[in-house]
């Protein structure tokens, strides 16, 4: 796994064993190709960060800032190591993602990435669905901001605060792009 493009392009990333299931390089490349110029100057948030690959890719491609949030100690250590090796800076938080999002300032981010764990207990709603239904994620995202999420199945209906821009399957995973509606 590596940073694909930008100032740190080609750098191999450390990944915490047994904690993270990183998005494949080709999928991450497709995500950033789809985002295009949206990344430059964006205030990014990388939820369920794992190795930090999504946020690091955003920083490498010109994002103004990135906050990385993961509850696992090994993930936080890997993100910090990867930031240092890439000569990039970011805010790294070891915290429950839902708790972070609830406390995040309003309209603090332009671009939010989430690559959550796929394994859930039967009948449990996926992490992104919980975040989207709570309203906290929409408040933390600037009007017109974009939420990119990897899911184990087709993405959920967007709900009142969201517009589904596109979704695509990549083998076993789906990647969905949502935009926060300006009036949400």
Image: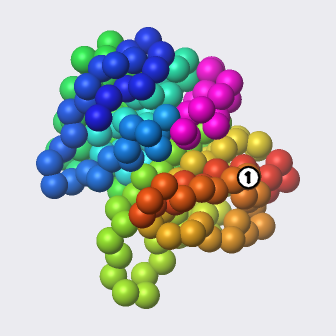
Which residue in the rendered view is the most extreme toward the right? 183
User: Is residue 46 visible in the rendered structure shown here?
Assistant: yes
Image side of residue 99 versus residue 182, left or right: left
Picture coordinates of residue 105 (x, y %)?
Answer: 59, 43
Picture coordinates of residue 45 (x, y %)?
Answer: 50, 39
Tell me if residue 41 is in the magenta stretch. Answer: yes
- Total numbered circles: 1
Q: Is mark 1 on a helix, strand or loop?
A: strand
Q: Residues within 10 Å of mark 1 (few under 14, many from 20)?
A: few
Image side of residue 13 versus residue 131, left or right: left
Picture coordinates of residue 72 (x, y %)?
Answer: 23, 51
For label 1, the residue is 165
- Classify the position of the C terminus by image quarter: bottom right
Tell me if residue 86 is in the magenta stretch. Answer: no
Q: Residue visible at 44% across and 39% down?
A: 26
Image side of residue 184 versus residue 176, left or right: right
Q: Residue visible at 30% across and 20% down?
A: 11
Check the image and report above or below for 94 versus 87: below
Nearer-the-camera pick, 22 or 79: 22
Picture coordinates of residue 50 (x, y %)?
Answer: 30, 45
Q: Residue visible at 61% across and 27% down?
A: 39
């Amino acid at each position: 796994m590596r940073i694909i493009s930008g100032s740190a392009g080609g750098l191999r990333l450390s990944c915490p064993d047994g904690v993270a299931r990183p998005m494949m390089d080709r999928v991450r490349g497709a995500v950033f190709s789809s985002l295009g110029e949206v990344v430059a100057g964006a205030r990014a948030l990388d939820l369920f960060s794992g190795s930090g690959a999504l946020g690091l890719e955003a920083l490498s491609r010109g994002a103004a800032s990135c906050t990385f949030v993961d509850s696992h100690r090994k993930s936080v250590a890997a993100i910090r190591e990867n930031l240092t090796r890439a000569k990039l800076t970011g805010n790294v938080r070891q915290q429950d993602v839902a708790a972070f999002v609830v406390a995040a300032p309003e309209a603090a981010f332009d671009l939010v990435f989430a690559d959550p764990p796929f394994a859930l207990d039967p009948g449990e709603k996926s992490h992104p669905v919980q975040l989207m239904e709570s309203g906290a994620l929409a408040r933390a995202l600037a009007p017109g901001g974009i939420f990119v999420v990897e899911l184990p199945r087709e993405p959920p209906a967007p709900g009142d605060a969201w517009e589904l821009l596109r979704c695509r399957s990549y083998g076993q995973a789906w990647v969905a792009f949502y935009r926060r509606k300006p009036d949400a």
